[in-house]
Structure formats: C-alpha cells, structure tokens
Amino acid sequence: MKLLLIAPAREEAMKRSRRHKSLAPPLNLGIVAALTPPEIEVSLVDENLAPIDVEAPVDLVGITAVTHTAPRAYRIAEAFRKRGVRVVLGGIHPSALPEEAAEHADAVVVGEAEGVWPNVIQDFSQGHLKKFYRSAARPDLSGLPWARRDLFAQSGYRIRGSIATTRGCPFSCAFCTVTSFFGKTYRFRPIPEVLQELESLRHKRPIFFVDDNIVGHAQRAKSLFRSLIPYKVHWIGQASINMAKDAELLDLAAASGCAGLFVGIESLSPESLASVSKRSNKVEDYEAAIERIHSVGIPIAGSFIFGFDYDTEDVFQETVDFVKRTRIETPQYGVLTPFPGTAVHDQMEREGRILTRDWSKYRLDNVVFEPKRMSSKTLQEGHDWAWRQTFSLASIVQRVGLLRTDVVPLWVANWNFRGHVARRAWA
C-alpha cells in the first residue's frame, strides 16, 4: 500500500513563476507519517517546494489544510478522487468545517490525529472508510513518535530543525484558531522526551520550537530552559509578552539559547484587547516589557493586528511609530480575520459583516469583513502602508542598526520581509 501526504500551497503561490523558501517543514504531516504502520510506503510533498503529481501511483492520499489553503486542498483532493484514489482531509480548516470538507473527501479527521489515524488506516485497508474520525479524548503527549523527517525536502526551508514541546495555549483569544483546534487545554510533552528528540537535531541551527506559547506555564518553561542550557543550542519560538514580568524566566530563556521570540502584541488599545479576550496583554507594560526582553539579548518578532472594533484610522501611524520607538526587530502586521471556528467569526457572522467566503483570501493580509470604525478599503490601505513604512531602508536601520556582523541575522530577516512587501501587488 502507498500513502501520499500533501501540504498544499496557498493560491497565490501557484501563480508564481518560481517557488520561494518556506519557514519550516510540515511537522504535522511528519507526525502522521510516523503514526502510519511501517509496512505502508509513505511519501510526502510540500507543494510550496515541489509540484504535486496527481497521476502518482498511490492508494491513499492525506491532505492537511489551514483556511487559506483549503480551496487548493479541495482541488487536489478532487483530482485524485476522479482517478478513484481515496482522500482523507485533516488540519485546522477541515476540523472547523468538517461538513464542508467532507464534500471533497472520502474521510475527514477532526482535531488531532494521534487517537484516530491508526483507525483510518485500518478502515481503509478493510474497504470501509468512515466519513468522520474524531478522537474521544485529547491525546496524551507522552511517548509520541518523532516526525518522519526523512520524508521532508532536503532544501527549501529556512529552518530545518522544528520540534514541539507543548500543545495548546492557556489563553483563549477570540481571533485565534488554537483553542478551537486543541481545545481549552495546555498539554506538555515530558522534558526528557523533548531532549532526546533534540539530540537528533543538534546539527540543525536554529531550532524552532513550534509551540503556540512556549512560556504558557512558567514553571514548566523554566524546567525546560534549564534542561536546554547544556545543549548549547540556538532556538526561536513563540511566547506571550507577559513573560517579561518574570526575571528568572527571561534570564533562563536567554541562557538556554533563545535567539528570538515571536510575540503577539496585537494592539495598543486596551479596549481592543479586551474585546477579543486578550487579557494577558497590558498596554501600559508594553514598552518596559520590550526593553526587558531586549536587555537579555533576545530579538522580538512583534505581531500586530489591524481591524479591531475599536480601531480608527489613527491605528496605523500609532503602531508604526511604536514599532520604531521600541525598535522591534521584525514586526509583522496582520488584518483581523474571522477564521471559522473562532469567536470572532461567530460574532461577525451574527452581525452580517463577513464580506467573502473565498477561503483563499483568509491570509491575514487581506480584508474579508466590514470594520466598525473605518471602511474595508481604508483598513486594507492602512495595513499595506504600515508594511511599506516599516520595511523601508530608513526604518530597518533605525530598528536594527547599521549592518554589522552581530546583526546580520536581523538584517537578513528584515530583507526577507522587504522582499515580501516587494512581491505583493500593493507594494
């Protein structure tokens, strides 16, 4: 039996004449491959890096999808099904809208795969796939198999060493899909198991911890960071800004080799933060928190969202000025997006504010709803302006400093974002 696992590209990527590097391999599909019985021949294609052969001689296809790749995932699925090949869909979007996904697949995995994937394989082998597979309980993260990294493309990724130490997040932000997919849980892998897997990745630098919030439980994070110190690795990850209040946690993160953190700052408006249940963020603490994180040598990839109900046209200039003033090294701006399965989606659905259900447009850089205090056109133009302003040469120099050996990685990151701006139609 032959199984093909596919990570589809976004629609706009298919229109490019050449492919660009992706951040990291599809770890989720690597884990699904590891859950597959060894007698089954497994192959994996990341469409961001390589084309998909819909005529490939395979028996079963598994496709993962987030919202903006769902249309492409459906087209791929239909191409295989026309040949009589069975297709299973899974991932964040099919889990949020399983009935929709079921129109394009023979089976849909809802939620995490660990509890159900062996059943999918067994049922397929016996010729009677069910339409939906849902795990009765959230999987225990002890004893998880390592991802089949041998199946990943050998080039094309900016970061090759990715690993998860937790699942979920202790917060439930109304715009985030993490809670809807992983449930209102925050689960940990045993640290010895994390370290054992890390040993196999030590030659890959930096390490990317894909956890949605690696510091969501401070004491557990401290234990992990202490354990990492002897390994002398460089790592990046995602964290909440309130970690800066814990000096010991911050010091341990730096000592463990933290080379950068993606931090969800989201908004400079307390009202906006409250409206989406982002209660962990305190605007009055932002500048001091950023200064403390910088003081231990950790660069920040600060994430901001435009389009909250309290946002006016002033939000764009205020945010760009804040980014420059606090010297956030790699800021990122997104548009509030009502992803299926989130509280924001449900609210906008009730209020009749969703403008399109073309899922390919749900990319965080495209307005798909009607804002309350500005037009959708103003929101789109303000978002695009903020990117251009922030990644001008003058702004990069102001935030990062002159090009020196010690800031080369930050210049590379900013140059990549500058290229992203240039490739966009609004650049």
Image: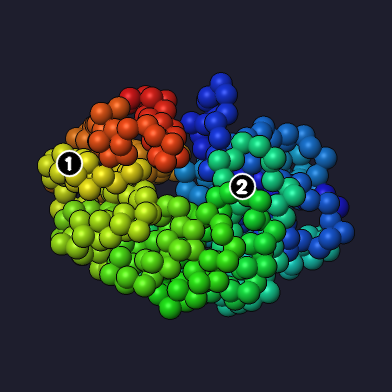
Three-letter amino acid code at the position of disc 1? Asp
Residue with the mark numbered 1: 321
Residue, x 73% and y 63% (percent of image)? 35
Mark 2, Cα crowd under 10 Å, few <14 / some 14-19 / many 20+, is many
Mark 1, Cα crowd under 10 Å, few <14 / some 14-19 / many 20+, is some
Q: Is residue 404 above or below residue 33?
A: above
Residue 241 at least partly seen: yes
Residue, x 22% and y 48% (percent of image)? 326
Q: Return the mark for residue 160.
A: 2
Viewer-proximal residue among 33 and 318: 318
Q: Residue furthest front?
A: 405
Three-letter amino acid code at the position of disc 2? Arg
Q: Residue furthest top?
A: 17
Q: Quadrant of residue 283?
A: bottom left
Residue 107 at least partly seen: no
Q: Is residue 104 above or below residue 18?
A: below
Residue 345, percent from left and from top: 34, 56
Residue 52, percent from left and from top: 69, 35
Number of numbered callouts drawn: 2
Residue, x 72% and y 35% (percent of image)? 54
Q: Earlier in the sequence, mark 1 or mark 2?
A: 2
Per the model, the C-alpha gap separating discs 1 and 2 is 34 Å
